[in-house]
Image (cartoon, rainbow, N blue to C red):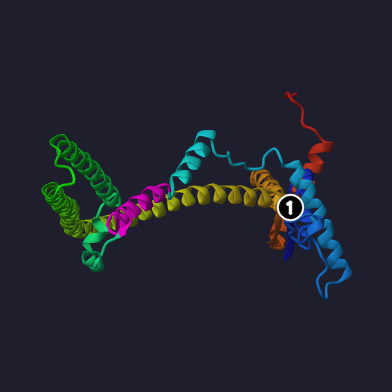
Amino acid sequence: MATETVINRPAPFVEDIGKKLSEQALGLQNVPVVTTGIGGISRQAGETDAGFQSRQDAARAFTTRQQNLSGLAPQVAGQDALQTQAQTLAQQGIGSFQPFLTSAQQQATGATTTLGGVPLGAQAFQQDVSQFMSPYQQQVIDVSLAEFDRNKQMQEQQLRDQQAKLGALGSGRAGVQLSEFGTGAARERALLQAGLLQQGFQQAQGARQQDIQNRFGLATAQQGLGGFQAGLGAQQQALQGADVTRLGQLGSINQVQRQAELDAQRESTRMAAFQPQEELNRFADITTGIMGGMRGTGTSTTNVPNPTPLQSALGVGSTLAGIYGAFNPRPLFGN
């Protein structure tokens, strides 16, 4: 029995493409993947000269690819001017309520602590009436008494002039008259002084009573202001909560913007780092497409049986007949 071997091979140009593809794939096996320039490469402990040189070469190639791909590198649009302005205004509004709230608290607290510079409290109701006397009362009394004395002297002089006209000046009766006049004038002077003092005391007492009533009213108002302060505290907490929410929203916006920038930077680095592998993958896809339309390669073996004696004899007879016919051709037409 005979053996027949058939070898199927692709076209020569397809073999060349496959060979180049294999060479490139093998060439990338020992190339390190580097995502930084030459400035970011430093020799590690225990690293061989060949390994360090290989990483340096890969870093230079990475920088070159980054420059080549700069026009295709992903980019993130910055915030619009209106967005920036809105964020600035939002940040300026954070905490802006505090001065107004502080002023309201100071006014509410100050109204319950003093009244005309006098402190409020239990000791305020124990103040002496003299503290409410007019500081100008003594001057008023002095002026009133001085006017009274001037009028007394004028009246006494008139009385002497009358006694002189009657010729009684210096007599015992005239002396008694002048003495009675002096006694009455002194009594009236004392009554005038006492009246002025009593009037000042009554006015001071009335002012003190009014002050006590005012303080009772303020004590009642203080309770209401306590509730007002509690309301201010609740409002402050609400405003601070709103500020926290606004800050969180602004932080989220900035975080999304920054994350987009990092993603674009990462994608740009990935493109530069894996460009050789991606080019090889595209080359392999093209090669596979070409080879897919070609006849399959490989080796096939077929066993052919040996001919029998009869087949050999018949084959010899056929061969001899063919030779005889070639040398003795038959005529095309009969004799």
Q: Is residue 214 visible?
A: no
307 vs 174, left or right, is right
Which residue is found at the position 78% from the left and 49% from the top?
63
Instruction: Answer with the quarter of the image where residue 106 lies.
Output: bottom left
Image coordinates of residue 246 in percent, x first then y, are 41, 49
Q: Nearer the viewer, residue 108 or 297?
A: 108
User: What percent of the width, then of the height, locates residue 329?
Assistant: 80, 33
The magenta stretch spans residue 127 = no
Please determine whether, in this image, residue 48 is positioned above or below residue 95: below
Amino acid under label 1?
Gly
Residue 89 visible? The answer is: yes
For mark 1, give the secondary structure. Answer: helix
Is residue 97 located in the magenta-colored stretch of the structure? yes
Question: In which quarter of the view is residue 158 placed?
Answer: top left
Classify 10 Å Cα crowding around label 1: few (below 14), some (14-19), many (20 and above): few
Name above or below for residue 156 compared with residue 209: above
Magenta-tinted stretch? 96-118
The quadrant of the image that shows the N terminus is bottom right
* Residue on which the image places disc 1: 315
Outermost residue toward the bottom in this view: 46
User: At x 45% / y 43%, what residue is drawn?
Assistant: 90
**Front in this rendered view, residue 18 or 69:** 69
The residue sitting at the right extreme is: 49
